[in-house]
Amino acid sequence: MVRSFLAVELPQTILDRIGEVQQELKSSSADVRWVNPGNIHLTLKFFGNIEEPEIDSIVKAIEEPVRTTSPISITVQGVGAFPGLKNPRVIWVGLHDEKGASVSFQKRLESELGKIGFPPEDRSFHPHLTLGRMRSNRGKDELVGRMERFKEEVFGQFQADKVILFKSDLRPTGPIYTPLREIRLRS
């Protein structure tokens, strides 16, 4: 079994800036399980545990929507939380693109993957980068105060020009992500 997900990687310069802001947020006394900045990515689809032969099926299913989609210009901006700042559970950085291209692209992927037995998510897709997850309410107010300073922060812009199927090995020190397959968007 291979624990896997489909994602878009970000340029190192943007990850470095996100890491700096994450350090500022970490300096609060909040009880948060932080994501290693090197593991931050835009998840398009989480598969969970799959069998090895399913890797080729997944790649085949997504080839058409990936190869017929032009690279998507994405702006990385703003720090927020799900479900909201009053009760933060997931701390995130926002992703924005013209005309919702990433949302429609993700819906096309979900549709094709549904045909091979991977049902779509119950909740709608909101492009974001997860920075951390609250474990308890300890330090919440201080964290939210720090987050307010970065709610309009622009981390940069990049072209999403490929999707990567990753393997995720869970370790006590945090997950290790290994690329299994990479498919480029139409150039």
Image: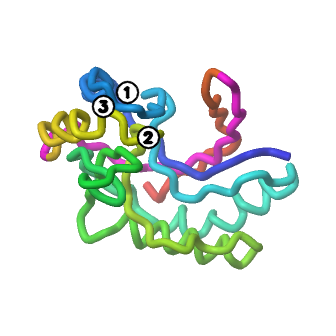
Q: Which residues are magenta?
A: 152-172
Disc 2 residue type? Answer: Ser
Q: Is residue 28 above or below residue 140?
A: above
Q: Position of residue 105 (x, y in %)?
A: 45, 68
Does residue 170 show up magenta in the picture? Answer: yes
Q: Are marks 3 and 1 in contact (CB under 8 Å)?
A: no
Regarding mark 1 in the picture, which secondary structure is present there?
helix
- Residue 23 lies in quadrant: top left
Regarding mark 3 in the picture, which secondary structure is present there?
helix
Q: Is residue 18 left or right of residue 118?
A: left
| Mark 3 → mark 1, Cα distance in angstroms | 10 Å
Picture residue at 65% right of the left edge, 42% below the top:
166
Q: Position of residue 149 (x, y in %)?
A: 12, 37
Name the residue tied to disc 1. Answer: 12
Q: For the residue carrying disc 3, how many other residues have a C-alpha within 10 Å: few (<14), some (14-19), or many (20+)?
A: many
Does residue 21 show up magenta in the picture? Answer: no
Name the residue tied to disc 2. Answer: 136
Picture residue at 31% right of the left edge, 69% below the top:
100
